[in-house]
């Protein structure tokens, strides 16, 4: 249990916990976004539309954040197209991507709602996993999550 989970209003002043080893090297959380090597993932999605991907070097395990020269990590940004109680449908096809759902983040706004667990259904209607996000997630919200490996936008569209 984290402080931002216990007191969601703290999300206005500190970013939610962030496992840097799950994201591309050089990734940093902000209050309502993630930057990968100083590029805003939220702004990138504004320009490219969703679903979109951003790939960078993976972090070498137990290295303190050193970038790998051979491994990659991809960040997928998807839009919530339907938010039902306990279920979120996203516009990305994520089956087979091995998404790290524990690291999923709401982009573009700071929520003060308590966290809830949601089932994720991808664009093909396939149950893709479960994620913990603020309970007020609604249609139109963007969610970013990392996936190990190098993935193309064609895989998620």
Image: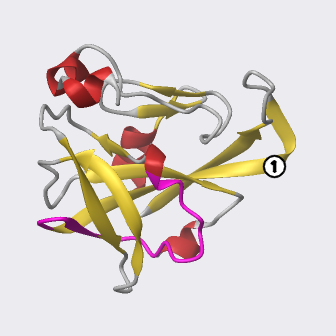
Q: Which residues are magenta?
A: 84-101
- Give the image quarter of residue 110: top left
| Nearer to me, 118 or 71 | 118
Left or right: 60, with 47 as reference point: right
| Nearer to me, 85 or 52 | 85
- Give the image quarter of residue 98: bottom right
| Nearer to me, 80 or 44 | 80
Within 10 Å of disc 1 (Cα), the crowding (few <14, some 14-19, many 20+) is some
Magenta span dominant secondary structure: loop
- Residue 66, above or below 81: above
Percent across and percent down for residue 9 are 15, 22
| Nearer to me, 1 or 52 | 1
Secondary element type, mark 1: strand
Q: Residue furthest top?
A: 13
Numbered label tally: 1
Mark yes or no: residue 49 visible.
Answer: no
- Residue 54, above or below 15: below
Give the residue at mark 1: 71
Mark yes or no: residue 24 visible.
Answer: yes
Left or right: 104, with 139 as reference point: right
Percent across and percent down for residue 136 are 11, 48
Q: Residue furthest right?
A: 69
Q: Quadrant of the N terminus?
A: top left
Left or right: 56, with 19 as reference point: right
Q: Is residue 37 covered in magenta?
A: no
Name the residue rendered at 36%, 28% in the picture. Answer: 16
Name the residue rendered at 79%, 29% in the picture. Answer: 62
Percent across and percent down for residue 40 are 44, 34
Q: Is residue 85 covered in magenta?
A: yes
């Amino acid at each position: 249990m984290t402080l931002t989970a216990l007191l969601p209003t703290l999300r206005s002043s500190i970013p939610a916990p962030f496992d840097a080893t799950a994201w591309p090297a050089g990734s940093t959380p902000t209050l309502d976004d993630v930057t990968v090597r100083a590029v805003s993932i939220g702004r990138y999605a504004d320009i490219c539309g969703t679903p979109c991907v951003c790939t960078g070097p993976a972090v070498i395990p137990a290295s303190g954040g050193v970038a790998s020269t051979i491994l990659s990590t991809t960040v997928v940004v998807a839009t919530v197209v339907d938010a039902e109680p306990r279920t979120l449908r996203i516009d990305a096809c994520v089956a087979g991507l091995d998404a790290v759902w524990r690291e999923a983040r709401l982009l573009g706004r700071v929520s003060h709602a308590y966290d809830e667990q949601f089932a994720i259904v991808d664009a093909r209607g396939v149950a893709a996993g479960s994620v913990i996000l603020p309970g007020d997630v609604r249609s139109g919200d963007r969610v970013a999550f990392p996936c190990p490996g190098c993935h193309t936008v064609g895989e998620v569209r």
